[in-house]
Image (spheres, rainbow, N blue to C red):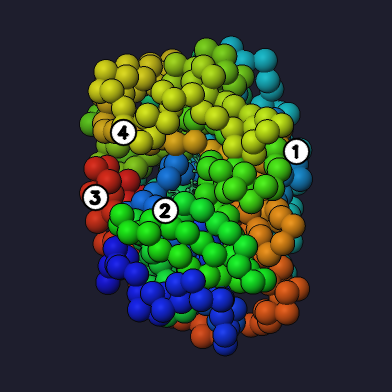
């Protein structure tokens, strides 16, 4: 199976034709996690035909993702309501895409140099834990983050000291065992106590891309058109005529309903339709480090810090074979001066500085990759001195992220609707894609296009098939295989 196909026969026939005769047709522009998930939900419902246009060569090919955010504990600054929403959305996401989680806990530390207090994290953790317990009580299939009773656990200095000399297990099976590699490496004087271990798992970008591609290939009513850029859109009957360039050839496709899932370029289509909208766009990057001395299976480790200052949050995300992904919320690492831009009165599309557009289109200068990766390693080594021996481990993971509205700290957002048969996904986190998709299913039902129980439930994809496809995608995009292979 390949998605790199030419325009299918039934689409060629529909060019310039009024949209559908028998079943409504939905056009989705953008094959990131949002567009792919909308296509999948519509396919599961079975009542509409779907055309998914993606200008890149494969699906889920945009900015990276490595945290599932099941509980939002990485973000001290967001509301409890957002955390609870992210919890619910993450659980639903794991039920839709069962092979995408890297099942290992996250450790949250408040640095000594930080003005925060670890005790301040506890009320929220308790609230999220109680909400998770309720979700599991309502439906045992929600138990995808382990036992709610063990959603989080605190470790004081003595407990960590006792783990320093403990042997590393073959496979960690208890919270204590997960903490052993950290206990052996952490500078105990650089953090406040206690540390929090929480069941926030990792999210595999490549297994999500693989799952989306393999799932959509099972639904004949979805046409996935990669290498296809939307160039213009015009009203046609009660729907839309989508003008696109497919491998250099101009095409027109008629649809009844239009979904804009263009990620950080959502505003370009808003502008073409004359739909005003306020949004932010932020360019950011994460880095890869190879640390051959790493011992044992690591949890994710987060050191809180004030965003945008030299002491911004540091994040260590473990993969296999000594590979780690690093974020540092400083302007020398993940963030960039002038990397956050807002839309204006005349355009819904925030304008990124050309140097960021160049990076997105053409890649990075090797010396910038080297220096920012080294900055990231140094940022983590402040807390984990042994990590200083790590070396840059591959190309950066980067891109621009849209945030609807004007609040740059918003993390849980999903969809908004235009004036006529038009929806735009506006997710900030991957786990919100399903909420956006479900809202669009409901909107179509309001158009009279029935939503009902899944028409043709499919057996789950095999884990092996997903991993195999994910490895192939990682290789095609020049990233190490380790990013595609399950950890934990
Ligand atoms: C450094 C960084 C780290 C991140 N980490 C996480 C994380 O750990 N967890 C998490 O959940 N989220 C994370 N995010 C956010 C996450 O990557 C985004 O929220 C998510 O990718 C948005 O998905 P999307 O489908 O809306 O947009 P995108 O993934 O950007 O997809 C939009 C697609 O539309 C296509 N497109 C645009 N215009 C056209 C057109 N005219 N015609 C055809 N196709 C078009 C693009 O090619 C693209 O493939 C991170 C973001 C960054 C930048």
Instruction: Relative to 301, say whether 369 is above or below.
Output: above
Local secondary structure at mark 1: loop
Is residue 233 rendered to the left or right of residue 293?
Answer: right
- The mark found on residue 476 in the picture is 3
Disc 4/disc 2 C-alpha distance (Å): 17 Å
Local secondary structure at mark 2: strand
Asked whether the residues under the numbered discs 4 and 1 touch, taking CB atoms below 8 Å apart as contact, a structural biologist would say no
Instruction: First in sequence, mark 2 or 3: give its number.
Output: 2
Asked whether the residues under the numbered discs 1 and 3 touch, taking CB atoms below 8 Å apart as contact, a structural biologist would say no
Name the residue located 61 percent from the left edge and 19 percent from the top edge: 306
Instruction: First in sequence, mark 3 or 4: give its number.
Output: 4
Residue labelled with disc 2: 229
Instruction: First in sequence, mark 2 or 1: give its number.
Output: 1
Number of the front mark, 4 or 2 = 2
Residue labelled with disc 4: 362
Is residue 262 rendered to the left or right of residue 279?
Answer: left
Instruction: Relative to 408, say whether 147 is above or below.
Output: below
Disc 3/disc 4 C-alpha distance (Å): 16 Å
Residue labelled with disc 1: 79
């Amino acid at each position: 199976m390949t998605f790199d196909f030419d325009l299918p026969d039934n689409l060629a026939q529909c060019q310039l034709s009024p949209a559908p005769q028998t079943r409504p047709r939905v056009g989705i522009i953008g094959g990131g996690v949002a567009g792919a998930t909308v296509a999948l939900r519509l396919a599961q419902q079975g009542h509409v035909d779907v055309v998914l246009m993606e200008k890149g060569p494969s699906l889920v090919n945009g900015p990276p993702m490595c945290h599932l955010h099941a509980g939002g504990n990485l973000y001290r600054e967001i509301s409890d309501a957002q955390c609870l929403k992210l919890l619910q959305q993450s659980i639903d996401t794991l039920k839709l895409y069962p092979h995408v989680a890297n099942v290992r806990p996250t450790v949250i530390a408040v640095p000594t140099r930080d003005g925060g207090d670890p005790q301040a994290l506890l009320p929220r953790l308790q609230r999220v834990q109680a909400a998770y317990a309720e979700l599991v009580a309502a439906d045992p299939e929600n138990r995808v983050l382990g036992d709610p009773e063990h959603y989080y656990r605190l470790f004081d200095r003595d407990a960590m000291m006792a783990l320093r000399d403990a042997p590393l297990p073959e496979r960690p099976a208890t919270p204590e065992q997960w903490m052993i590699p950290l206990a052996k490496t952490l500078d105990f004087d650089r953090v406040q106590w206690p540390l929090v271990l929480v069941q926030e798992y990792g999210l595999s970008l490549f297994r999500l891309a693989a799952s989306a591609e393999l799932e959509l290939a099972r639904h004949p009513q979805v046409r996935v058109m990669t290498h296809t850029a939307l160039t213009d859109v015009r009203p046609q009957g009660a729907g839309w005529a989508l003008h696109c360039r497919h491998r250099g050839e101009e095409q027109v496709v008629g649809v009844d309903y239009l979904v804009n899932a263009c990620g950080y370029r959502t505003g370009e289509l808003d502008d073409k339709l004359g739909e005003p909208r306020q949004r932010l766009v932020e360019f950011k990057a994460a880095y890869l480090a190879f640390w051959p001395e790493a011992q044992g299976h690591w949890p994710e480790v987060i050191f809180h810090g004030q965003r945008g200052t030299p002491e911004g949050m540091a994040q260590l995300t473990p993969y296999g074979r000594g590979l780690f992904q690093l974020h540092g919320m400083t302007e020398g690492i993940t963030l960039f001066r002038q990397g956050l831009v807002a839309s204006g009165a005349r355009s819904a599309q925030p304008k990124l500085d050309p140097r960021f557009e160049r990076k997105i289109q053409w890649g990075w200068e090797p010396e910038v990759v080297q220096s920012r990766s080294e900055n990231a390693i140094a940022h983590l080594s402040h807390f984990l001195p042994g990590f200083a021996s790590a070396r840059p481990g591959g190309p950066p993971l980067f891109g621009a992220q849209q945030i609807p509205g004007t609040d740059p700290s918003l993390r849980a957002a999903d969809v908004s609707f235009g004036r006529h048969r038009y929806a735009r996904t506006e997710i900030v986190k991957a786990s919100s894609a399903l909420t956006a998709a479900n809202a669009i299913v409901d909107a179509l039902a309001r158009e009279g296009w029935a939503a009902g129980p899944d028409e043709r439930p499919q057996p789950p994809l095999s884990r092996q098939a997903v991993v195999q496809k994910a490895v192939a995608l990682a290789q095609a995009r020049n990233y190490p295989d380790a990013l595609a292979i399950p950890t934990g």
